[in-house]
Image (cartoon, rainbow, N blue to C red):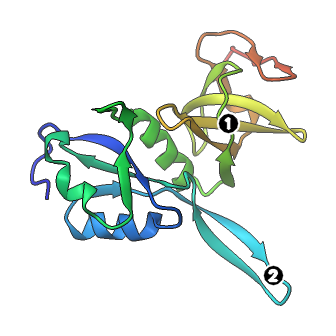
Amino acid sequence: MESADEGTLWYALHVRARFEKVVSRNLRGKGYTEFLPLYRRTSRWSDRTKEIELPLFPGYVFCKFNPTHRMPILTIPGVNSIVGIGKSLMPVEEQELSNIRTVLESDLYCEPWPFFQAGQAVRVLYGPLAGTEGVVTLVKNSYRLVISVNLLQRSVAVEIDRDCLKPVADQQLITADHQIPVSTSR
């Protein structure tokens, strides 16, 4: 159990398929600070419709811990590994997780999104996502702010009003097929 924040960083745990909630519950039970971002989706079966919660990043749970004390985490049932390069663990940027939390707390519709690097980075100027940074894209005449966790190469998209966006580098936004002019006068 982590008693102090000294040397603790956020890491992504690669977990067994459909074990995200179990691993999250076990981490919390052992006193670790964990983060399992969930989104709601309506599922339809032949006899009923139900709203279910699913992980935004299937196969991953985030946990804050000191990497020198990782063995108790690796022994939790369902944990496959800690994400890294070779034998070096790679921490997740705390700002990326903060952006994901902001999206979830906004109660705006969000969903998993394919990771991509095209497009200009933007910052939300006002509204429930104020201060959040991401990349904007256009889907079916609706703008979406895409927030990424680079280490996992996974992203989340949330519907957004383009008027509340400002380019981080004051340039045009470029997506796969569209140039989206953004007003910088705000």
Looking at the picture, how far across and down is residue 53, in whole percent? 59, 69
Q: Earlier in the sequence, mark 2 or mark 1?
A: 2
> Callout 2, which amino acid?
Trp
Q: Is residue 174 left or right of residue 141?
A: left
State the residue at coordinates (15%, 44%).
5
Tell which of 87 and 39 is nearer to you.
87
Give the residue number, with chain letter if any, for mark 1: 145
Looking at the picture, how far across and down is residue 91, in whole percent? 33, 34
State the residue at coordinates (52%, 62%).
17
Q: Secondary structure at mark 1?
A: strand
- Farthest right residue in view: 141
Q: Few, some or many C-alpha atoms within 10 Å of disc 1 (few <14, some 14-19, many ≥20)? A: many
Which quadrant, please, contains the C terminus? Answer: top right
Q: Is residue 159 left or right of residue 140?
A: left
Which quadrant, please, contains the N terminus? Answer: bottom left
Give the residue number, with chain letter if any, for mark 2: 45
Looking at the picture, how far across and down is residue 149, in whole percent? 51, 36
Label 2 vs label 1: CA separation?
30 Å
